[in-house]
Image (cartoon, rainbow, N blue to C red):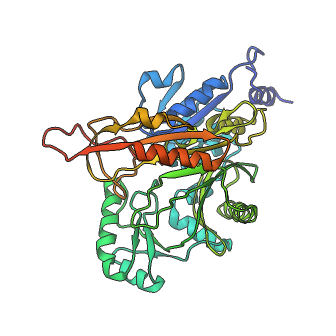
Amino acid sequence: MSSRSSAVAAFSHGEDPRTGRRRRRRVALVASASGYRLGDFLDAARALRLEVVLATDAAPPAPTLGPHRVLTVDLSRIDEAAAAIARTEPEAIVPVEDVGVRVAAAAAALLGLPANPPEAAAAARDKLLARRRLAAGGIHQPEFLPVPPGGLGAVAARLGGPIVVKPRRLSGGRGVLRLETAADADVVEERIRRIVADEGGDPTEDLVAERYVPGPELAVEGVLRRGELEVLATIDVPDASSGPTFEETFLIAPSRLPDAALDAAIATLSDAVAALGLVEGPIHAELRLAETPMILEIAARPIGGRCGRAFRFGLLGESLETTLLRAALDLPGPAASLVGAAGIFMVPVARPGRFVGLRNLEAALAVPGVTEIEVAVPPGRRVRPLPEDGRYLGFVFAAGDDPAFVEEALRTAASLLEVEIHERAEGADPGPAPSAPT
């Protein structure tokens, strides 16, 4: 074996080829500095004693980072950001949010690391491209059509109502609206394209229109290893929205759907990730269970917002982020089976204005089963509801032995919380809230 090959082999096993001593494994996290997920991943890296290179669009507050290295990159410039990450020589690259998916794949390709092919990552970030790949693979999904500028009325007439209209690259429900009839098409299309422009996208690119699919909604959290899907959690969405906007409120794991329905959904999802070409890393998917499971969304990153914090896995009760980092570095560890039942209530924004706060927190936190309540938006921030903004005001977490108990705890806590939002007063608005979850 050449000296270079010996060095690479030692590097992959966590040994410094220069000194022969074991060193910390190095992982690169690709994330927006303003996203929700960064802190939980950094906590997981500390628990695993990993060295972290944080590739991000701005430096987060110093207390968040600890000893980790920050690499400031423009995440919209895929090749440049990937090259900068590759120069740090990480052993694994994990996209924390949608914004990092393509960059992570491109950087891994430069280093020859196990990762999603760049073209598969691009499909996971583009709803229209994903729909076309799934259709080519024969995957069950809603009937869909692209929407050229000014074309929603004609598309709606072809598909028949109701339909759901989406931007190609936004997430978290931003820009997603239900359209009942072609008569409202111009207003809906103009609104969505304005949201795309406000988010820095191209308002003239095609949108995606899909026939609305009724039925129970299921979310699946998983991780891919060499093309094999390992399901970490099946998650019920008991109050799944039927429109006109598509906020999520309650998420409960594990799912209480019949085993046959879950098996069919997971089989459909496995076929779908293969059709997209995804082979490595975290997966978050959403399906509607009509006569047959239908793929709504597949993202090549973990569940958004603070939601991952609810779940614990294995005998050690490790976090979702710890589980994903173990998988990325192929570290040994306990089987990643979900511990007990868990759930989240996400506090939506009901109307625009200035967020003052959440009231009755103590009473809600005292509900049996509720483990934590986090207020996610600082008081005084301007907030807007979906579809313009996908940010949630806070998160309520619950855990127990039974999903029904967890759901009841969350519903009780939600009924006790009061959201205080004031109409914006001139001179009292300190600026927009941080970016929406992905």
Q: Residue at the far right: name it.
A: 1
Left or right of residue 419, residue 235 in this image: right
Which residue does the image show at 40% across and 35% down from the upper left? 361
Quarter location, residue 278: bottom right
Left or right of residue 81, residue 318 in this image: right
Residue 100 shows up from this direction: no
Quarter location, residue 379: top left
Count of all numbered marks drawn on residues in the image: 0
Quarter location, residue 322: top right
| Of residues 306 and 82, the one drawn nearer to the viewer in this rendering | 306
Left or right of residue 192, residue 344 in this image: right
Image coords of residue 427 (percent x, y): 13, 39
Image coords of residue 222 (percent x, y): 67, 49
Q: Residue at the far bottom: name it.
A: 158
Image coords of residue 345 (percent x, y): 49, 46
Quarter of the image where the N terminus is located: top right
Residue 10 shows up from this direction: yes
| Of residues 306 and 418, the one drawn nearer to the viewer in this rendering | 418
Q: Residue at the far left: name it.
A: 426
Image coords of residue 134 (percent x, y): 63, 69
Work out whether 400 lies above or below 278.
above
| Of residues 259 and 366, the one drawn nearer to the viewer in this rendering | 366
